[in-house]
Image (cartoon, rainbow, N blue to C red):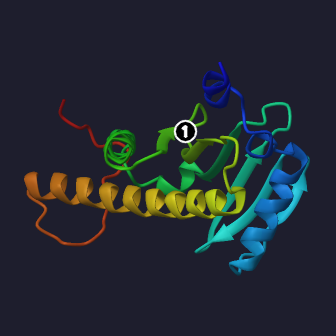
Amino acid sequence: MALFDKFTKKNSEAATLAPSSVLPTILEALSKEGYRPERDNEIRIVYKNEGIFCCFYYREDDPEFLLVRATFERAAFDDVHEAFLYKACAKTDFDQKVSKAYVDEEGDIVFSVEAFIMPGTPIDRLALRMSDALASTVAFYHRALKQLVEEYNKENGDDSETNNPIAPTTTLPN
């Protein structure tokens, strides 16, 4: 029975996660890396990464879940047909690990990295890795979007190598 107990009892040190320490730990880790994070409310830390506004979200009433997100308003892509935005999201979701790219109900492009916090997880390292993954996802999305537009333009007689997106009124084939 003692052997069974060894594997079924939780390690009390590893299982102890003080939810109230998660956001302060993330704040400190981001600060040490040179970001200038701010805790702007009870559940959110905001900071800029390579000029991109990012937010960590953590709720003490859901202590095992952590999210970091970046959002681009639809207006930033006004000159790109909506179909390209969705295709770039799909390509990003397929290729990038632990991250999501989607168009929200207002038409904004949202990138997120989500994680479950297991007992004993080093929150500072997890947060920095999530931040890096988010930056990688945003960069991948922009490359994928540019590539999709360029491929479409070449297939339709526009041989330019420029980043001129398709106008929103353009009809795309199925």
In which quarter of the view is residue 12 placed?
top right
At a point 85% along the width and 38% down the height, the residue shown is: 60
Tally of numbered tags: 1
**If the image is split into quadrants, where does the C terminus sit?**
top left
Q: Secondary structure at mark 1?
A: loop
Q: Relative to residue 16, is residue 161 depicted above or below?
A: below
32 or 154: nearer the eye?
32
Residue 133 percent coordinates (x, y) = 50, 58
Residue 132 percent coordinates (x, y) = 53, 64
At a point 26% along the width and 55% down the height, the residue shown is: 149
Residue 52 percent coordinates (x, y) = 61, 66
Residue 127 percent coordinates (x, y) = 66, 58
143 or 61: nearer the eye?
61
35 or 171: nearer the eye?
35
**If the image is split into quadrants, where does the N terminus sit?**
top right
Please tell me how crowded label 1 is: few (under 14), some (14-19), or many (20+) other residues with Cα within 10 Å. some
Q: Is residue 7 left or right of residue 13?
A: left
117 or 14: nearer the eye?
14
Q: Is residue 89 left or right of residue 9?
A: left
Tag 1 residue: 107
At a point 53% along the width and 57% down the height, the residue shown is: 134
Q: Amino acid at mark 1?
A: Gly
Q: Is residue 22 left or right of residue 42?
A: left
Q: Is residue 158 left or right of residue 23?
A: left
